[in-house]
């Protein structure tokens, strides 16, 4: 909008905040399109400044390092140390935790208390067998946020959440990849396979419940 002299007026603080919130939520859902984990950190730095939460965001980064959820190679590095690969969608699910606690995360679906408690109650049994992305969506319904693209050939994460910031996010981590061949573009799985469900835990690795596929990827650990 221009003033009476034709000069452009600066946007208000609330307009800037809404823009940053929209960018954060888009980047969490499609982190690869926005520049990956580095871009997520930049977005969160800007949002923390706009909301005067720089100290809390700094403390969060320290906490991630203390829990071994952030290594010298970032959050992606923490996943890589866990099962040999770290992707932007995996990292996005961790950044989403801080966003949820501080009211930045816009949920596509808000789980009721009953839905959330049921999900927690069946997680261990669900992970006793290998599960596909389609089976998981069929069982638990659409996620609160979907991290990653829709292509079945690449990893992704489904995040389920209530509207209560203190409730840990429940993150379902799926894996797929192309077979190692210059000519063979066949994927390892017909659709992404669940490796683990993550939720809570004092240490990063403590929060995972692994499927057989996830345990195998860790070398049987």
Image: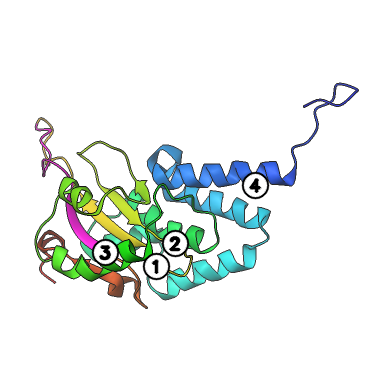
Q: CA distance from mark 4 to mark 1?
A: 25 Å
Residue on which disc 2 sits: 97
Secondary structure beneath dot 4 equals helix
- Sequence-first tag of 2 and 1: 2
- Can you give x and y, in whole percent of width and height, for residue 64 in the image? 44, 69
Residue on which disc 4 sits: 17
Which of 172 and 218 lies nearest the eye of the viewer? 172
Residue at left offset 15%, top offset 49%: 135
Secondary structure beneath dot 1 equals loop
Residue on which disc 3 sits: 119
Magenta span of residues? 184-197
- Sequence-first tag of 3 and 1: 3
Residue at left offset 54%, top offset 42%: 22
Residue at left offset 28%, top offset 60%: 80
Mark 1 nearby-residue class (10 Å; few <14, some 14–19, many ≥20) = some
State the residue lying farthest toward the right.
Answer: 5
Residue on which disc 1 sits: 168
Tag nearer the camera, 3 or 1: 3
Mark 2 nearby-residue class (10 Å; few <14, some 14–19, many ≥20) = many
């Amino acid at each position: 909008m221009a003033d009476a002299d034709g000069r452009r007026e600066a946007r208000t603080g609330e307009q800037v905040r809404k823009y940053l919130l929209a960018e954060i939520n888009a980047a969490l859902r499609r982190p690869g399109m926005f520049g990956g984990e580095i871009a997520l950190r930049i977005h969160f730095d800007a949002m923390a400044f706009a909301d005067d939460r720089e100290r809390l965001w700094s403390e969060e980064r320290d906490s991630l390092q203390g829990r071994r959820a952030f290594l010298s190679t970032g959050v992606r590095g923490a996943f890589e140390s866990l099962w040999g690969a770290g992707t932007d969608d995996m990292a996005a699910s961790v950044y989403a935790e801080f966003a949820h606690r501080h009211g930045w995360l816009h949920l596509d679906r808000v789980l009721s208390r009953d839905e959330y408690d049921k999900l927690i109650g069946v997680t261990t049994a669900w992970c006793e067998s290998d599960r596909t992305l389609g089976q998981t969506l069929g069982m638990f319904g659409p996620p609160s946020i979907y991290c990653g693209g829709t292509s079945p050939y690449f990893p992704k994460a489904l995040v389920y959440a209530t509207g209560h910031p203190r409730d840990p996010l429940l993150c379902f981590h799926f894996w797929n990849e192309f077979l190692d061949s210059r000519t063979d573009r066949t994927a390892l799985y017909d659709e992404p396979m669940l490796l683990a469900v993550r939720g809570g835990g004092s240490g990063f690795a403590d929060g995972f419940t692994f499927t057989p596929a996830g345990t195998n990827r860790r070398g049987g650990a």
